[in-house]
Image (cartoon, rainbow, N blue to C red):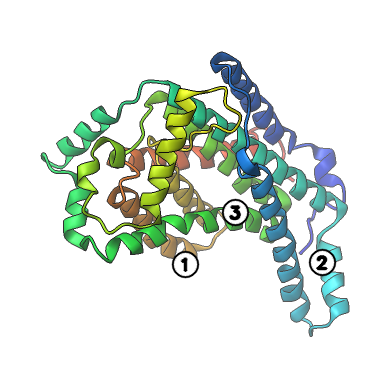
């Protein structure tokens, strides 16, 4: 099914301008903060922007080919039919919107990562969040309760795999929305909502700066079998210390921030978007994955319980803001 608006129609309607307006405003906020802390935008090793946008374009091409194969196969597969299926669906209009949409998303993500890094200069509130966690669980640590429930030997590796699967799920999800949505505009609802997750998320970091339970209560995690998560946490703390020691050093960059959990937030966003697109069964399966992600964030010490609650709220708000951005009230939806 091709975009019923026809070639060039979506570009002429300019509904995508509102997504770019979000990028520009957020970029202005990031620039202001950069000047305030006197630290320039950074992309150490190209891993924040260049490597991620390259991966997104690779996934885009792969999914377009897959979509073409599936569509051509319905009428008897051949190379010519695959090419025809791809060309009929991927007009210049749709290609331009997909490419510029990915650029907009990754600019927002780069602004988010730099703002997150600069939040290291502010006072952290880990002790308050740790106290809140224990108050909610009647004086007990929720992480220790999970350690007692699941054990400390095999479970850390299982939850490490769940936690790290996030880095695979994220880029595939928003690119898939652009490829498989019947209209590119509906794909933009997911893409723009994802942008709002990062924007609202970094806002939560500034509202309540924190590092995480693994730092504020390290004794609770000392008995866990070491994993790559343990090494990553140590690496992130070393990077944060380098930034605080010498903010002017070329590649100093902090990657740690607890409140809120955007692993939880983005996972819930995917669940909500599956429901938005009508994939009820997939959304029901996503509930299981969401719970597993939330448990892993607490078990491994990345987040406090309130961080996960905040992540759910951020995703809910982000979906609504994403829909309002792409489908402003009072405007005819094409």
Which residue occupies 30% across, 38% down? Answer: 215
**Residue 105 falls left or right of residue 15:** left
Quick one: SS at disc 3?
helix
Residue 117: x %, y % from top left:
50, 30
> Is 36 located above or below residue 81 in the figure?
above
Q: From the image, state whether disc 1 or disc 2 is nearer to you.
A: 2
Q: Quadrant of residue 74?
A: bottom right
The residue to which callout 1 is attached is 281
Which residue occupies 50% across, 23% down? Answer: 246
**Residue nearer the viewer, 18 or 221:** 221
If you read the primary sequence from the N terminus, does the residue marked by circle 1 or circle 2 appear first? 2
Quick one: SS at disc 1?
helix
**Residue nearer the viewer, 47 or 6:** 47
Within 10 Å of disc 1 (Cα), the crowding (few <14, some 14-19, many 20+) is: few
**Residue 233 falls left or right of residue 61:** left
Residue 258: which numbered mark, if any? none
Residue 259: x %, y % from top left:
38, 34
The residue to which callout 3 is attached is 171
- The answer to whether mark 3 and mark 2 are in CB contact below 8 A is no
If you read the primary sequence from the N terminus, does the residue marked by circle 3 or circle 2 appear first? 2
Q: CA distance from mark 3 to mark 2?
A: 22 Å
Within 10 Å of disc 2 (Cα), the crowding (few <14, some 14-19, many 20+) is: many
Residue 99: x %, y % from top left:
76, 48
Which residue occupies 64% across, 48% down? Answer: 52
Within 10 Å of disc 3 (Cα), the crowding (few <14, some 14-19, many 20+) is: some
Residue 240: x %, y % from top left:
44, 32
Which residue occupies 25% across, 55% down? Answer: 224
The residue to which callout 2 is attached is 86
Quick one: SS at disc 2?
helix
If you read the primary sequence from the N terminus, does the residue marked by circle 1 or circle 3 appear first? 3
């Amino acid at each position: 099914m091709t975009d019923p608006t026809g070639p060039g129609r979506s570009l002429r309607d300019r509904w995508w301008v509102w997504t770019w307006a979000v990028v520009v405003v957020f970029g202005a906020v990031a620039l202001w903060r950069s000047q305030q802390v006197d630290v320039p935008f950074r992309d150490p090793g190209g891993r924040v922007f260049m490597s991620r946008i390259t991966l997104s374009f690779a996934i885009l091409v792969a999914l377009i080919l897959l979509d073409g194969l599936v569509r051509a196969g319905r009428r008897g597969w051949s190379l010519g039919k695959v090419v025809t299926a791809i060309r009929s669906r991927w007009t210049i209009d749709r290609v331009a919107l997909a490419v510029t949409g990915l650029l907009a998303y990754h600019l927002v993500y780069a602004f988010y990562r730099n703002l997150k890094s600069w939040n290291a200069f502010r006072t952290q509130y880990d002790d308050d969040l740790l106290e809140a966690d224990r108050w909610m669980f009647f004086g007990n640590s929720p992480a220790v309760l999970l350690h007692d429930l699941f054990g400390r030997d095999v479970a850390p590796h299982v939850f490490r795999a769940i936690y790290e699967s996030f880095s695979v799920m994220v880029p595939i999800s928003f690119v898939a929305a652009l490829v498989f949505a019947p209209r590119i505009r509906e794909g933009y609802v997911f893409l723009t909502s994802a942008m709002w997750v990062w924007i609202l998320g970094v806002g939560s970091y500034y509202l309540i700066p924190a590092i995480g339970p693994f730092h504020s209560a390290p004794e609770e995690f000392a008995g866990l079998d070491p994993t790559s998560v343990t090494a990553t946490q140590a690496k992130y703390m070393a990077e944060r210390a380098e930034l605080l020691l010498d903010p002017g050093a070329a590649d100093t960059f902090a990657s740690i921030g607890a409140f809120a959990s955007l692993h939880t937030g983005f996972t819930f966003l995917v669940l909500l978007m599956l429901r938005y697109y009508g994939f009820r069964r997939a959304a029901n399966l996503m509930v299981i994955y969401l719970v597993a992600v939330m448990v892993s964030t607490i078990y491994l010490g990345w987040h406090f319980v309130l961080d996960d609650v905040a992540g759910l709220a951020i995703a809910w708000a982000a979906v609504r803001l994403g829909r309002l951005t792409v489908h402003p009230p009072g405007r005819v939806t094409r």
